[in-house]
Amino acid sequence: MLTAKGKYGLKALVYLAQSPPGELSLVADVAEANNIPKKFLDAILGDLRNAGLVVSRKGKGGGYRLARTPDQITVGAIVRVLEGPLAPIACASHTRYQPCDDCDVASCQVRHMMVDVRNAIAAVLDKTTLAEMRDMDGRALPLELLTA
């Protein structure tokens, strides 16, 4: 499940994706436009900066902007930075796999189902760019974009 951190981070990056290329946006403006607590957004943008998804400049005329164009940033990359692995359980994770104490990895039906769930989530998030998300205008992406 996406937490408030993930949701706010996505909203903030969509806001930055709507800005003219190279233009810096103030944290206060991003927070106000998206109804995000400014202090929480500061922390989120710090994580995104550390991951190389945004760049910042301090002082007068400072702010945040995307580190790359919106079509070069996937939603999956953003979610992984803010939320961690996409898998619903640790034994289904590709990046932070941990075996369960109570089952056999090879024959556990729960694990196999959760690997399928993780793969389906990753397929959608990793195919969708920030530019596509920005351009949704309240509509879901067409199914053919997600399955192509």
Image (cartoon, rainbow, N blue to C red):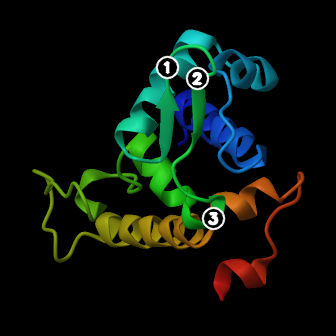
Left or right, 47 with reference to 9: left
Question: Which quadrant holds the C terminus?
Answer: bottom right
The answer to which quarter of the image holds residue 119 is bottom left
- Residue 98 pos. (x, y %): 15, 54
Kind of residue indicated by mark 3: Thr
- Residue 13 pos. (x, y %): 64, 42
- Residue 136 pos. (x, y %): 84, 59
The residue depicted at 19 percent of the width and 58 percent of the height is 97
Residue 129 numbered tag: 3
Whole-angstrom CA distance, mark 1 to mark 3, is 28 Å
Whole-angstrom CA distance, mark 1 to mark 2, is 5 Å
The residue at which mark 2 appears reads as 62
Kind of residue indicated by mark 2: Gly
Residue 26 numbered tag: none
Q: Nearer the viewer, residue 85 or 34?
A: 34
Q: Are marks 1 and 2 in contact (CB under 8 Å)?
A: yes
Q: Nearer the viewer, residue 100 or 58?
A: 58
The residue at which mark 1 appears reads as 58
The residue depicted at 43 percent of the width and 28 percent of the height is 46
Whole-angstrom CA distance, mark 3 to mark 2, is 26 Å
Left or right, 90 with reference to 45: left
Q: Is 144 located above or below residue 89 in the figure? A: below
Q: Are marks 3 and 2 in contact (CB under 8 Å)?
A: no
Kind of residue indicated by mark 1: Lys
**Helix, strand or loop status at disc 1:** loop
